Image: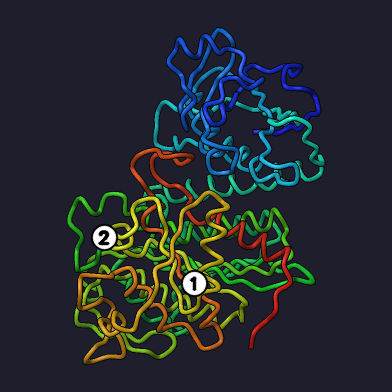
Amino acid sequence: MNFEITNSPIKEIASDLEIIIVVENNLKHKFVQDKKLLKKAGFAGGQDEVCHLISKNRLYVGAEGLKGAPIRSAVAIAVRSLLGKKYKSVKIAAYLSHPRCTASLRALVEGMVLGSYTFNKYKSKKIKSRIKNVLISTEGYEENYEVSLESMARAVHNGDIAANATNFTRDIVNTTPDDCYPQIMAEIAEELADNSSLKCNILKPKALKKEKMETLLAVARASRHKPRVIHLAHKPKNHKAVISLIGKGLTYDSGGLSLKPADYMVTMKSDKSGGSAVLGIMKAISEMNLPIEVHGFVGAVENMIGGDAYKPDDVLTAKNGKTIEIRNTDAEGRLVLADVLCYAQQEVKADYLFDFATLTGACVVGVGHYTSGVMGNADEPKELVVKMATQAGEMATKLDFNRHLKKTIKSEIADVCNISNTRYGGAITAGQFLSEFIDENHKEKWAHIDIAGPAFVEHAWAENPYGASGAGVRMMLRLIEKLARTEIHKKG
């Protein structure tokens, strides 16, 4: 999809189709040319409501305001309605929300790219978006808007990169476990590095053994697919800060010997969403070439059953020397993350440390399908994630640790147990388990992001299609972009 910004008024631009956003049900706005036809069709302009006037080559969609979230969603819904249609070029106004702010323009571009997404790999008849060119008029929604073409071009450029990285992530998550296993994830990372300035290092089983990543190896050992730990690095000169991203890359999770019920195994290809998000973020970071040193670590593992499977009642030793009593082999993601977190902190002394994981069903129960839970020892990194998620159009909320819940992961025979002794507060106790593997240097710089809810949903919602959403990519890009504009005062 090619984007072009033009100073021409919207009426003077030639295209196959015009997309018109009806803001706050305002059918009297100058962009609305078919008021009578719209009323006849029963179109009121509610959020994401679509009316396609085929004879006029105009498509109307409603948005409840000019902020990024409603604009992104409206445009995505509009473009999704055009999948498989003949249109190759569309025109649209910029719909800027403020003369000095291009956030809604970036959201518009993201909506275009995200809404055009389809996953057709396993379809014999493939339906795709045919839109190749998008012409964006600088004509403002309000009168006398003057925004520099440079800032508009930057918003379009960054929005295009962020949305394409999200779609890249979606593709990895949606790919079946037979076609995407640890070795394949490693190959995707290597290909990213080959086609960019990223550096890539892959740890195979011998290296993992040498690094004493025994909890990760235990989870992996019943699978015919050997584990990998991926390390991608973006290291610009004169960087302002150092960030480490850690992703849970369970390419498939059967539950191990604590076998999942059959219905719960469906969609477990999505358990690699955290690791896939890290790959997508690294792709975008290299394309934006931001002045932040960013390291992406992915623990790519498959959790299966067999005579060599790790067992409830086992005691495993993590990379940092802590012992873990196993009471449920389906609580495996936290075991993989424990070792990868330790390895990431050993390799990189970061200003911020963020991990992404489809870690707990409890998080989905607690905050719903659409929201990520953000946890950690300190308020600053958690609040930063929540704020940037909101700006990116993702939903996230803090889930605070407390000392009483931490007691529930105490073990009588080891340093810590991999599950809680209570069914309540499972998202928080999983986060508190991970906190056992954060060293003193990173204790207040770390946030855990449980994306179990929004990462994979079996229906379309807003700019997200059926299946993988690419959760975490846009929120973290916004966060890193913010740090690129901010002076970081290093601690300790």
Residue at numbered disc 1: 447
Q: Position of residue 323 (x, y in %)?
A: 33, 88
Q: Say which mark, if any, is on residue 14.
A: none
Residue sticking out furthest to the top: 55
Q: Rounded to the nearest whole Å, what is the CA distance between mark 2 and mark 1? A: 27 Å
Say if 201 sits above or below 181 in the image. below
Q: Give the percent coordinates (x, y) of residue 206.
A: 46, 78
Residue depicted at x 70% and y 31%? 142
Q: Earlier in the sequence, mark 2 or mark 1?
A: 2
Indicate the amino acid at tag 2. Answer: Ser
Q: Nearer the viewer, residue 484 or 184?
A: 484
Taking the image as shown, residue 430 lies to the left or right of residue 140, namely: left
Where is 7 relative to 366, above or below? above
Q: Amino acid at mark 1?
A: Ala
Please report the residue visible at 37 percent of the width from the left and 58 percent of the height from the top.
Answer: 452
Residue at the farthest left position: 261
Q: Is residue 266 left or right of residue 377?
A: left
Give the residue pinned by disc 2: 254
